[in-house]
Image (spheres, rainbow, N blue to C red):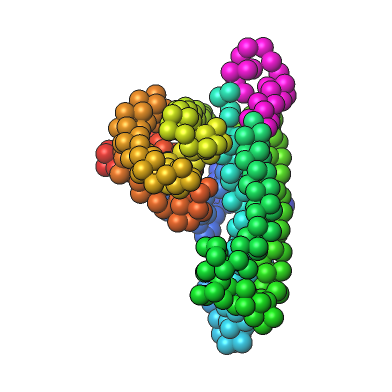
Amino acid sequence: MPAQASSRPGSAVSDPHRRDGAEAPREQSGTEAAGPADASPETARRKGDPPESAAAAADRRPPAGGGQDASPVAEAWRRRLGGVPAARRSWFQIGFGLALGGSLAWLLVQTVLRLSELLTLLLLAVFIAVSLEPVVALLGRLGLRRSWSVAAVLAGFAGVLAGFLALVIPPVTDAVNALSDGIPRWRQQLHDHHSTLGRLEDRYHIIEKAQSRLSAGGASQVAGGVLGAGQLVISLITSAVIVITVTLYVMAALPTIKQFCYRFVPGTRRPRVEAVTEEILSRVGRYMLGNIATSAIAGLATFVWCEVVGVPYGAALGFFVALMDMVPVVGSTVGGIVVSLVALTVSFPVALATAAFYIGFRVAEDYLIMPRAMKFAVDVHPVVTVVAVLAGGSLLGIIGGLVAIPAAVALGIVLDEYVFPRTDAS
């Protein structure tokens, strides 16, 4: 009786023509009989793995066509991919998909536009936190914990704000008191035909025109203007609270935030990304310290000039110029115009002299003070500085002009680190 084949795959069967009684291996079919030279990578299997059945192999391959007469295997594969054959798609489904995608894109754009003000405030808060990081790190090297370092920075900021309010509130109070005291006197002069205001009233009929405007709906416009001013003040206070709060949280958790963001980078590239990020943050902090130094010089120069020529409110104006000078290119110009207008209350020659002083100071700041202060911080070409400030101011206003130069510095570092080496090597 001939030997029967084993039930296991790959078992040998007895060959009746062999005299030595050894068992010859069973003939293989298909790709197995072709040998290693004819075996393709798709059909190659690891040694020792059981052979794959024809049905399983066919089920792994996607069908060539997707028509209605597809086999059950092809239909199962189509359901697995979740696709719909092109022949079964209708214009309604295509149009519905396009309309849904366009609606979602429009909704996303509208959401970003509505949140643009909040996103701008968050950007300002992050920028302030990064700018104050060198101070926090310095206090940490002196032995303070990070929470105490942040508290010390907050106390210093509160002291600066209190000093600014102490300088600004008295002049504003005096101006309001002078206005309230002068209103009855001005009304009396309007009815006096021998005074200057009385002659203006006789010629232009100011009181009559004001009453007609109020009766024609001017009262509602005045009330709307007052409400608008109140809403503006409330909005400014709310924005200031949001910026201060977010800045404190970012300052306290900045190392944790950085480590969390680094985890999105693959481990092989993480050290390089960390080095580039730390360099960007370091340069941003040094830029802000240099900017604060130049702003302090501008404020001190304004205070000295106002005290010499007799312009009132010299301390408040000096503080205002120092704040405006932190905005590159346009900040010091705006501050000089405001101080020159205040100098008109003294005399016209004093105002002209003040304007000439600020022109000379602006030249000295651009060519002497700023280059020396920024030499250790950033190295950006003046053309890049002007273009960045103009673009940032057009997009985000004063905040955009403030963060424009650090953004240009960060872009330059990224280009030097990732883009230029590849283009030079190609």
Q: Nearer the viewer, residue 286 or 279?
A: 286
Residue at the spot 27% in from the left edge and 38% down from the top edge: 425
The answer to which quarter of the image holds residue 76 is bottom right
Furthest residue in direction top, as rendered: 143
Residue 187 in percent (x, y) is at 65, 63
Residue 373 versus residue 124 in the image, above or below: above
Horizontally, is 27 left or right of 291 in the view? right
Q: Nearer the viewer, residue 346 or 302?
A: 346
Residue at the spot 70% in from the left edge and 36% down from the top edge: 249
Q: Is residue 160 magenta?
A: yes
Q: Which residues are magenta?
A: 136-162
Horizontally, is 409 left or right of 74 in the view? left
Residue 114 versus residue 106 in the image, above or below: above
Residue 380 in percent (x, y) is at 35, 36
Q: Is residue 86 magenta?
A: no
Which secondary structure dominates the residues rendered in magenta? helix
Specify the quadrant that holds the C terminus.
top left
Residue 125 in percent (x, y) is at 62, 41
Furthest residue in direction bottom, as rendered: 91
Residue at the spot 72% in from the left edge and 21% down from the top edge: 148
Residue 86 versus residue 154 in the image, above or below: below
